[in-house]
Amino acid sequence: MAKDYRILVVVNSEIRPGFKLSGVDVVSPESAREAEKIIEEEMNSDRYGIIILDENFLHRFSEKVKNEVLDSVVPLIVPINLSRISEESPEEYLENVVRRAVGFQIKVRA
């Protein structure tokens, strides 16, 4: 029997309401250290199949945990830059996030 995994989003409290509306589980840690602790716990549980993580937290994780996050398969941890200022269009940014997460390129249509 296949396991039903949930999705967890780890973001700051300002962005939390938008993700809550989508029906996923959302946590808003007060610090990068708290976020790192949450990620470590959830990587060792079997509750979540996908964890969306604000990149701003990831940048402040220890190197050990950062490498574990980037190498994780289940749960698949997808770091996203929620405060991005970039030359990329939103579609290009999303395509790059998905390519990093799943390992191949997709085309997003606007």
Image (spheres, rainbow, N blue to C red):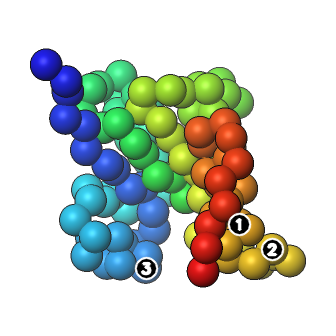
Task: Name the residue beneath numbered marker 1.
Answer: 93
Q: Earlier in the sequence, mark 2 or mark 3?
A: 3
Q: Residue at position x 50%, y 26% from top? A: 73
Q: Is residue 18 above or below residue 98?
A: below
Task: Name the residue beneath numbered marker 3.
Answer: 14
Which percent across, then down, holds residue 16?
A: 36, 72
Numbered label tally = 3
Viewer-nearest residue: 64 or 52: 52
Marks 1 and 3, Cα distance to the nearest angstrom?
Answer: 21 Å
Viewer-nearest residue: 109 or 3: 109
Q: Earlier in the sequence, mark 1 or mark 2?
A: 2
Give amino acid for label 3. Answer: Glu
Q: Is residue 44 above or below residue 108?
A: above
Which percent across, then down, holds residue 95?
A: 67, 59
Q: Residue at position x 22%, y 65% from top? A: 23
Q: Residue 28's quadrant in the figure?
A: bottom left
Task: Name the residue beneath numbered marker 2.
Answer: 88
Which percent across, then down, holds residue 34?
A: 44, 47
Which one is in front in this view, the residue at disc 2 or the one at disc 3? 2
Give amino acid for label 2. Answer: Glu
Give amino acid for label 1. Answer: Tyr
Q: Residues within 10 Å of mark 1 (few under 14, many from 20)?
A: some
Which one is in front in this view, the residue at disc 1 or the one at disc 3? 1
Where is the C terminus found, in terms of image quarters? bottom right
Marks 1 and 2, Cα distance to the nearest angstrom?
Answer: 6 Å
- Asked whether the residues under the numbered discs 1 and 2 touch, taking CB atoms below 8 Å apart as contact, a structural biologist would say yes
